[in-house]
Amino acid sequence: MAEQAAQARPASGETFVRYTVEIDSLADFGTFIQKEMDRNLHPAVGHIVTDSPHGLTWGDWLHSPAVSRSRGHYGDAHRQAVQNLRLYLEAGAVMIAVIDRVMQTYRNSEEMARLSTQDVLSTFTAVRDERTADRAARAKA
């Protein structure tokens, strides 16, 4: 998708790797991420959320301190796994939105050649902030 083209030296003296990205390859990558989420992740989320409470009740009738600690550790691991899934889905959605926005802004090879790391970071930040604001607005409604 991207090939290392050259080393660039900014005024600060730091070395950055310069990449040449083909627009079609970027679109293919975005499509791949979208299909991965649509086919594998989104369909499974409902099952995970529905099944998740059942796992935390194992051994709840036992009054052993060891079982109680084990249930607590299991609950912590379970909550972290669900949190990681949520973050994975969110990261995928942000990546797709960033790719779409970059492709809309830099429509051809000449424009894409002017794309900098800072441009991508700014786009990422804008998309993330928009999604955060949308979530906050939905939570208030």
Image (spheres, rainbow, N blue to C red):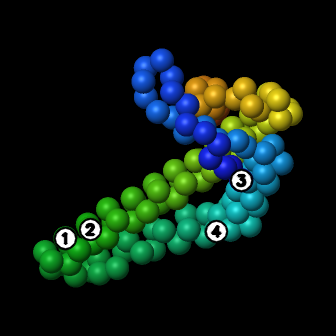
Disc 2 or 4, which lies upstream in sequence?
A: 4
Check the image and report above or below for 108 versus 78: above
Tell me where residue 13 sits by quadrant: top left
Badge 1: residue crowd in 10 Å (few <14, some 14–19, many ≥20): few
Q: Earlier in the sequence, mark 1 or mark 4?
A: 4
Secondary-structure class at tag 1: helix
Question: What's the CA distance linking mark 2 and mark 4?
Answer: 24 Å
Nearest the viewer among 62 and 30 is 30
> Which residue is situated farthest in the top direction here?
11
The residue at which mark 1 appears reads as 69
| Residue type for callout 2 | His
Q: Are circles 3 and 2 on residues that touch, CB within 8 Å?
A: no
Helix, strand or loop status at disc 2? helix
Which residue is the site of mark 3? Answer: 1
- Circle nearer the viewer, 3 or 2: 3
**Which residue bears the numbered disc 4?**
44
The mark lying in front, picked from 1 and 4, is 4
Q: Between label 3 and label 4, give the one nearer the viewer.
A: 3
